[in-house]
Image: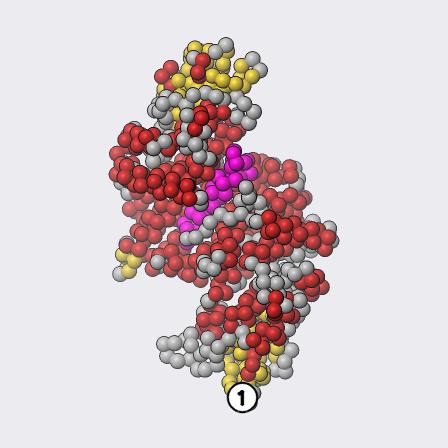
Amino acid sequence: MQFAPTVLTPAEEALRAEVREFLAAELPADHRPALGFAGRHDPHFSRTLAERGWVGMAIPPEYGGHGRSAVDRFIVAEELLAAGAPIGAHFVADRQTAPALLHFGTEEQRRRFLPGIAAGEVYFSLGMSEPDSGSDLASVRTRATRTDGGWTVTGTKVWTSEAHNNHFFAVLCRTSPMEEGSKHAGLSQLIVDLHAPGVTVSPIPYLDGSHHFNEVALEEVFVPGDMVLGELGSGWRQVTSELAYERSGPDRWLSTFPVLREWLRERPDLTDADAAVLGRLAARARAIRHLSLSVARSLDAGEAPAVEAALVKEVGTRFEQDLVEALRDAAETELDQGSGSLFRALLAEAVLTSPSYTLRGGTTEILRSVAAKGLAS
Amino acid sequence: MSDDRTMLTEVATGLFRDLCTPEDVVAAEPTGWSERLWTALSESGFPAVSVPEEAGGSGGDVADACALLTVAGRFAAPVPLAETGLLGGWALAAAGLELPEGPVSVAVDRPDDAVELTGGRFSARLSRVPWGRRSTRVVAFAESGGQRFVVSAPTAAATVTPGRNLAAEPRDTLVWDDVELADDALAPAPTGVDTEALRLRGALARSAQIAGALARVAELTVRYTGERQQFGRAVARFQAVQAHLVTIAEEAELARLAVEVAALNARPDPSFPDVAAAKSAAGEAATIAARASHQAHGAIGMTKEYELGQLSRRLWSWRDEFGGERHWSRELGRQLAAEGADALWPRISTGLVGA
């Protein structure tokens, strides 16, 4: 285990102050905070943020990005999430797609997509889950077959966030038939234009009534040959390797923080019992933050803290849920999405959406199994 | 960790490994005390780490003392290492009083305590004093004539009623009945040297011990579940058992980092939000990890000879000492509420502060 306490440098502290100042100016005082990275799709906000250099921070300057450290990205992300800023448009492209393109993409793909991502203008979804493939991603059935100049892709992806608003998605699919004993071979990632002919996006109504997730049906969709992300047949390695380290960021423990803050705002005269709830949650959030920040620092040192990252996500996402239930219990109210104060509206939203925190990006069960293997070795 | 602190930790670990084995801890249980270990620690100057050298201490800072206490917690050391230096030694040194030979303990004004100081005569009833019967002096605060004093009360002049925590560590009640204090047993308390500050140090010390014990609990559980065979394979191969291992690792690391940040930020004294957060988180971690570890161990964990019980009984005691989770959560919550909603995030996101 290599969690070590880490101090922010003066430059990092200055960045944090700058982001806070920006958010104070940019977000209206009465804005409804988004809960987590998937909270709200707002291209204007994403572009404004990008103008400040806070999108595509991991992308090198030659591709329009800023070549910043993992800790700098951590600082920006935690400030945005704590404020409940609407980062839903660019966040997945920024956190997941850009590093994948940098690690595995061709030079042409990098030149084509990265500048747009860094400008907060090109948005990606993930195309992994299918109706019969959740945690067991190797079982995906979406198939790509060779055709003149590229591939023809057929299959169905589900839980595709913001596919109705985004531009592309990275589709994990089978490019050669499954062979006995090697189900991880023959998988590839293709970059698919969500507006291409044969692509049908339809909403998956969510528990809280929002339209965030979609089913994306691919019916003989033509994908040009140069849109294979990384090596053909390396899809499994790509989706499970280095990107795993992206698991432990502030988006894994801060999703519900705005609910806590708004509770305190509406209830300044806390009883002793309420104060104990507040103090306990704050103490735990602080401790989890120490862990999460330490992973970012160790990434910058070139280490590969895979087990640590899994632990942070496992404990962080459970904390996000724990916070919601502790506040519900303390609030002694009946939940109603449509009426009541900002706190109560956020609490209602959080109760309805919080089961997803321990599912998305690797379920708690999968993470435990990843972490336990590391602990035993 | 600084090189000096790493070396200190390594030397201390070696010493405890030799003189504080699980068998030694079992043997010490009837008295809650290991003379041999205390002598060795004293010869190395460990009990007085963080007490300035000019005051008769060993020098070093709060983070050094906490690093030592983490090691002591890991080995379930039956000696008042925290009380002698980081707590009692600190108050004595700050008041210009001599650091006595032998163990020192402290009193933090518990609800049923009473202290009276009139013209150098001392009467008090102090309860749950750690290793009270073994200490040469007990450090307490007293008011007299509108002034606050640090009292270095001689244990020899007290009546002792033994008590113990769940791990049989002495937690005694001491009564002084109108005892004349010598000149070297009394001095005005400087600003900032008071019961609150002492309790803060006590809470930090117990958090550090908890962090050390949790690290060992995590190791023991990984080792045991890797060896124990049931249904034809190691029980660690079962997902339900793996979930316990992960929980323990998370809680152990979470507590350790909270303690390290609080200790490193203590320049020179621990801060309230750091310690309140650390004790709250460490106390909760102790509860969760002890439960998970016992579950993963099965019946073997319930035998008194096995090492886990030495640690879990301390975890169940230390989480309550110098204030439990509810106490520190409530106090922290009160401060956060007073600072207001918009100050909440800046407070939570203040971690380790640069020198």
Q: Chain of mark 1?
A: A
Image point (48%, 65%), residue name: A242
Q: Which residue is mark 1?
A: A147
Q: Residue at x 69, y 53 (%)?
A: A23
In the rendered image, residue B212, in percent from the top left (x then y), is placed at: 39, 42
Against B282, is B94 above or below? above
Local crowd at mark 1 within 10 Å, few (<14), some, or many (≥20)? Answer: few
State the image quarter where residue A36 is shown.
bottom right
Residue type marked 1: Thr
Region rendered in magenta: B246-275
Can residue A261 be seen from the camera position used here?
yes
Q: Is residue A324 above or below residue A205?
A: above
Residue B75 shown left or right of residue A152 in the figure: left
B77 magenta-colored: no
Q: Name the magenta segment's main secondary structure.
A: helix
Mark 1 secondary-structure assignment: strand
- Residue B262 in the magenta stretch? The answer is yes
Q: Residue furthest front?
A: B54
Residue projecting furthest to the bottom: A148
Residue B191 lies, in percent from the top left, at 56, 24
A135 and B208: which is toward the camera: B208
Q: Inspect this view and state whether residue B79 appears.
A: no
Judging depth in this view, the residue of B195 and A253 nearest the camera is B195
Q: Residue at x 55, y 89 (%)?
A: A148
Residue A216 in the figure: left or right of residue B169: right
